[in-house]
Amino acid sequence: MESMLALLLALASVPFQLSRGQSLQVNPPEPEVAVAMGTSLRITCSMSCDKGVARVHWRGLDTSLGSVQTLPGSSILSVRGMLSDTGTPVCVGSCGSRSFQHSVKILVYAFPDQLVVSPEFLVPGQDQIVSCTAHNIWPADPNSVSFALLLGEQRLEGAQALEPEQEEETQEADGTPLFRMTQRWLLPSLGTPAPPALHCQVTMQLPKLVLTHRREIPASIVALWIGSLVLGLLALAFLAYRLRKCYRSGPRPDTSSCTLL
């Protein structure tokens, strides 16, 4: 019984002894990495052997342009921030007869602060269509990019979202297209006075990264002036009513008991 137990303990220790010092170390360690277009990123893959020097290299993507630097026991992949860098490279390492691999999903994105809203001003008292367009973005995926029309920090109630539009806009040097995405809403009459402003918000959600841009759609200055004038007239009418009520009791009322509010 004791000999059997000793044998089981010995077998249990074999994988640890074989793998000790023989695993790939990748930095950054995340399995998915988002890289802004035009920025660079270095992904280092290394491995150590108990005996000898490990052989490590990257494969996948286009590694023929000097984007990979291989050293004894390590390999460095340089991502140039081009949309063509999107993909899943694999780091392969070997130590003696044992080999390991580790894949990293790279997503290069474009999300500049280039929002255009229409109309320039909100007009109260009538139905209207509000649009919001995000230019030069990638990926142009409804699962990644979302639009919202906000009143303050809350979504505007009663706004009807129309069918979104997507159109190719420009192309990068490598031939990869960028897109513009447009969302329109049908707004019911906002009433008088109109709210000071609405905001169009566009959000791009990527692995461990959320980006947001926002544009204001202000109310018409004339509409705001009319709204303020209406409120002023209502306030004056209320004060006049209170004063009339106060002095209606007789020619010499007790004014000390009269309050305007």
Image (spheres, helix red, strand yellow):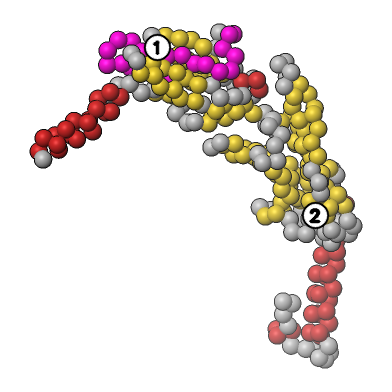
Q: Which residue is mark 2?
A: 160
Image point 39% across, 19% down: which residue?
Answer: 99
Image quadrant holding the N terminus, namely top left
**Residue under the point 77% across and 53% down:** 196
The magenta segment is 44-65
Left or right relative to 166: residue 21: left
Q: Say which quadrant the C terminus sits in.
A: bottom right
Q: Quadrant of residue 15?
A: top left
Q: Amino acid at mark 2?
A: Gln
List x then y, in percent, for residue 218: 79, 48
What's the distance in space between the residues labelled 1 and 2, CA to CA?
59 Å
Which residue was labeled with disc 1? Answer: 55
In the image, is residue 6 above or below residue 26? below
Instruction: Indicate yes or no whether the magenta region holds residue 210.
Output: no
x, y percent for residue 84: 65, 20
Whether residue 163 is situated above or below residue 253 in the rendered picture: above
Give the prevailing secondary structure in the magenta stretch.
loop
- Neighbourhood count class around disc 1 (C-alpha, 10 Å): few under 14, some 14–19, many 20 upward: many
